[in-house]
Every structure is written in C-alpha cells, then in structure tokens.
Amino acid sequence: MLDAVVVGAGQSGLAVSYYLRKYGADFVVLDASDTPGGAWPHYWDALTLFSRAEFSNLPGWPMPSYEGYPPRDHVVTYFSRYEQRYDLPIHRGERVERVLHDGSVFTVNGYVARNVVMATGIWSAPFVPFVPGSFAGEQIHSATYARPEDFAGRRVAVVGGGNSGAQIVVDLALAGIDVQWFTRRPPAFMPDNVDGEQLFRRNRERFVAIARGDGDPGGADFGGDIVMVPEVRRARERGLLTAEPMVGSLDELSSFDALIWATGFRPALSAVRGLEHGLDTPGLYVLGFDSLNGPGAGTIGGVSPFARDIARRIMGKR
C-alpha cells in the first residue's frame, strides 16, 4: 500500500512530491496530461509571470534565471527539468475522475493509498457566469485562448476585469485586433512599481503570521489587482486599455464576432465531491488553492510551505 497518491503534476504536485520524496514516502503522481508542465502548456502564447525568476521557485531547485518576467515556455521547461532532476514517480495520461474511500484507505485509478493529495489546480474548471440572452458568434474561455492571430479580421469582446482579462485585451489590441473590454466594475490597476515580488513578500508575511497564531493580517492594499507588466503599461500608454460596463444581456453583443470569457476558475475537485465526508475525509489533502490553503498557495513561489506541511503530516513528522 502506498503512503500517498498525488493527483496532478503542476506546480503544487511537484512541490509536495519533492517533500514526500525527501521524507521517504512511497507514492505516485497521477497526471492527466501526456506532457510535463501542468496547466502552463495550455495557457496563451504571450503569458508571462508577474514576478522575476528568483521569486518563482519550487522547493529544492530555483527557477533558472531570466531577464525580465519569465514567459510560459520558460516555466514549462523548468517544470520538466524539475521532474527529471528529482526523478519523480509521475504517471502520465492518468485522468482521475473519481477518488474512492472505504473508511480507511483510498483507491485512485487502481492505486491504493493511505492518503491522497489533490493538487489539481484550477485550469480544468473554468467559470463562466450566467448572463441572459444569446450570442451567435464564437465563445471561448480564457483557458483555451492561445493567440491574437486566431481572431484576425474579427471584432472581439473580452469579459472579465482581472489580470487575465487585461492581458488578453492587451495581447489582442497590440496585434491590431478590434477588441472591446467589458467589466462589472472599473478595472483597478496596481502602481507601476508593484509586481509579483511585493505580492510574494506580503503573502509570506501573512503565512508566517497565521502559522504563529497571530491571525491573518490581510493582503496589502496596492490600489488595485491588475499587475502592470510591461505589455499592459505599453497598451495603457497607447490608450488601448479602456473598459465598458458589462452588458445586461448577451443580445447587446450582437455586433461582435467572438466572445472571450476571462472570468476565472474554480478548484478542480470534482473527483472528491462524491466522498461521504467531502474535503473533511481523513487522509485527504488539497493543495494549491489560496481559498482553501492560505495566501500564496496558488503560486509557484508560494506553494512550498503548504506542500511541506502536508508531506510532514502524511509521514508523521510533526
């Protein structure tokens, strides 16, 4: 019997696998993809991190240096080499539809284990809000957006006021695509000198305070939530970052050819929803979610302390 089955080989799965291996666990990692990188190979071509490489490290081995903000493919290469460096027991093409628990042990795709770590991320659970009306053109979620060339010659509406919405609008606009941004409230931009480094430091301060029992001091108020990466600043300087209030009905978007929903994700935890005790099942852990684990858990540089804590619990190293 295994000590643990880890579901997902993205940043969270890699981080907890590092610690499980360090503590001598007998475990496997099941990943739905046929290639390394977690969700990162699926993100759009121009996506970059919000922070420099030195603030985007998995445990044990730092991300290789990069001038500026590392792009998607730099992250994918790092994850791939990380797997190889630590010879992690990753089984690919293993989509987990259901986790079973008989009251004492788990069964996952035929593997039997005392513990399960759901490091499944959010990419496979895109969220699209209900908006009345109908839209005759193409609709996609930001999860499947790839590049502006796919929308050449078309008028595009982007819905969503967060970082994904802003960056996709910028990607399209700088490529000359006719795009209009729609948000529920006016977009709120961070100061130009604030990036992932400051967010990382604040999340770490919050984690330490919570671990000490002092309570969560809360996130810093940077005046917004959209990070001003270079492309976003460039689009702003060219007057390409104006947003319209979100429409009340999709019928109002009839002049557009395509609609991109940049409206976020939900934790991809459907495989454990059928358990009698749900997320409270003994031996079941979730990892990589700010809303469930704590501040920074959903980031490359912030997941490590949460991963270490879970691995220590599994191996009884309290």
Image (tube, rainbow, N blue to C red):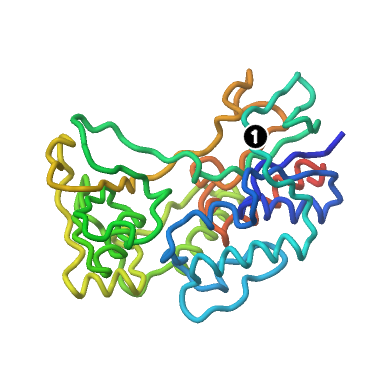
The residue drawn where x is 65% and y is 50% is 34
Q: Quadrant of residue 247?
A: top left
The answer to which of 285 and 132 lies nearer the viewer is 132
Callout 1: SS: loop
Residue 292: % across, % down: 53, 40
The answer to which of 223 and 37 lies nearer the viewer is 37
In the displayed image of the protein, which residue is found farthest to the bottom? 67
Q: Is residue 306 visible?
A: no
Amino acid under disc 1: Val
Q: Quadrant of residue 222?
A: bottom left
How many discs mark residues in the rendered view? 1
The residue drawn where x is 76% and y is 65% is 85
> Looking at the image, is 176 positioned above or below residue 114?
below
The answer to which of 68 and 19 lies nearer the viewer is 68
In the displayed image of the protein, which residue is found farthest to the front? 153
User: Pointer 1: what residue?
Assistant: 96
Quadrant (top left/top right/bottom left/bottom right) for the N terminus: top right
Quadrant (top left/top right/bottom left/bottom right) for the C terminus: top right
The residue drawn where x is 67% and y is 62% is 80
Residue 229: % across, % down: 36, 70
Left/right of residue 139 with respect to residue 237 in the rendered view:
right
The answer to which of 262 and 204 lies nearer the viewer is 262
> Looking at the image, is 135 positioned above or below residue 307?
above
Left/right of residue 280 with respect to residue 180 in the rendered view:
right
Near mark 1 (Cα within 10 A), the count class, few <14, some 14-19 or many ≥20, is some
Left/right of residue 79 with respect to residue 72 in the rendered view:
right
Residue 87: % across, % down: 80, 59
The residue drawn where x is 84% and y is 37% is 2
Q: Is residue 297 visible?
A: yes
Residue 55: % across, % down: 55, 69
